[in-house]
Amino acid sequence: MKNIPALFCFGILFGISARAAKVDTIAIYSNAMHKDLKCVVILPDDYSAGKNFPVVYLLNGYSGGYKDWVRPNVKTTADEYGIIAVCVDGGYESWYFDSPADTSSKYETYISKEIPAYIDAHYRTIKDREHRAIAGLSMGGHGAMYLAIKHKDFFGACASMSGGVDFTPFPDNWAIAKVLGDYEHHKTLWEQNTVNYLVGFLKDKDLAISFECGTEDFFINVNRALHEKLLSLKISHDYAERPGAHNWTFWDNAILHQMLFFHNYFSQK
């Protein structure tokens, strides 16, 4: 890895009862993509106590960025549960692949290897898969489950909120063709990179899995299909539907459920 990236500490403190989480903005160099990208690291109040902490990596959706998950409910739950939350930059339209169509887009490598290597080296983390989780919304919901399945030796738990867990019904949307090539000529590649396909390679208990979707969301049918497939494969998972659409009203509530899910998982380990 390149020389240690500069750490830009916001030193932002905010009140949560008598406690406060701390927020750092850092730049992490990607050898795979030959550029720096920013992350936000949210540290719980008792980070100063000197112990080590589990980590949750949070992925942005399509057209989003690294600041998207710097939300009050993330800060509150990171503080309450003693979790380091890392809000990464997954690009506007990466879909978290190492793209065969664009060799400069290597977000699978960046998110699953380069960022965690930096975080483990520079923060007091618990460095095993049982204390490492990944979650995201929309494109990032796909990314969280996709990366966790492909790197289940590294991540122990994953969560998706309104995730694009099967994007094959949407061949003309969200620049996926830029990443994988057009659907008409690359159908097999598209299908084999969906979460719905990849769960077929899982065994029960390989991962702690949780996902949810709003009943008015355009991704509701693909999430229901994933739930049914996991049931047919007898793979344990948490699945929920709630009233809601594809927006922050839903995600701000959803992250509360998913951070509790991760807290319970970490506590059992």
Image (spheres, rainbow, N blue to C red):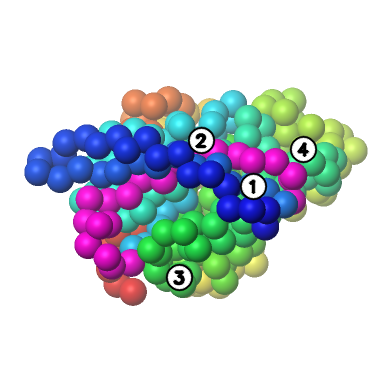
Q: How many marks?
A: 4
Toward the viewer: 113 or 28? 28
- What is the span of residues highlighted in magenta in the rendered image? 32-52
Q: Position of residue 145 (x, y in %)?
A: 55, 53
**Considering the image in quadrants, where does the C terminus appear?**
bottom left
Which of the two discs, 2 and 4, labels the residue nearer the N terminus?
Answer: 2
Residue under numbered circle 3: 127
Which of the two discs, 3 and 2, labels the residue nearer the N terminus?
Answer: 2
Mark 3 secondary-structure assignment: loop
Crowd tier of the residue under label 1, counting other residues whose Cα lies within 10 Å: few below 14, some 14–19, many 20 or above: many
Type of amino acid at the residue the image marks with label 4: Val
The span from disc 3 to disc 1 (Cα, nearest Å) is 21 Å
In contact (CB < 8 Å): disc 2 and disc 1:
no
Residue 166 magenta-drawn?
no
The span from disc 4 to disc 3 (Cα, nearest Å) is 31 Å
Type of amino acid at the residue the image marks with label 3: Lys
Mark 2 secondary-structure assignment: loop
Toward the viewer: 78 or 144? 78
| Residue drawn where x is 26% and y is 44% of the image | 21
Q: Tell me the quarter of the picture where residue 47 sits.
A: bottom left
Residue under numbered circle 2: 66
Residue under numbered circle 4: 179
Which of the two discs, 4 and 3, labels the residue nearer the N terminus?
Answer: 3
Residue 39 magenta-drawn?
yes
Residue 266 versus residue 30 in the image, above or below = below
**Considering the image in quadrants, where does the N terminus appear?**
bottom right
Residue 124 versus residue 2 in the image, above or below = below
Q: Nearer the viewer, mark 3 or mark 1?
A: 1
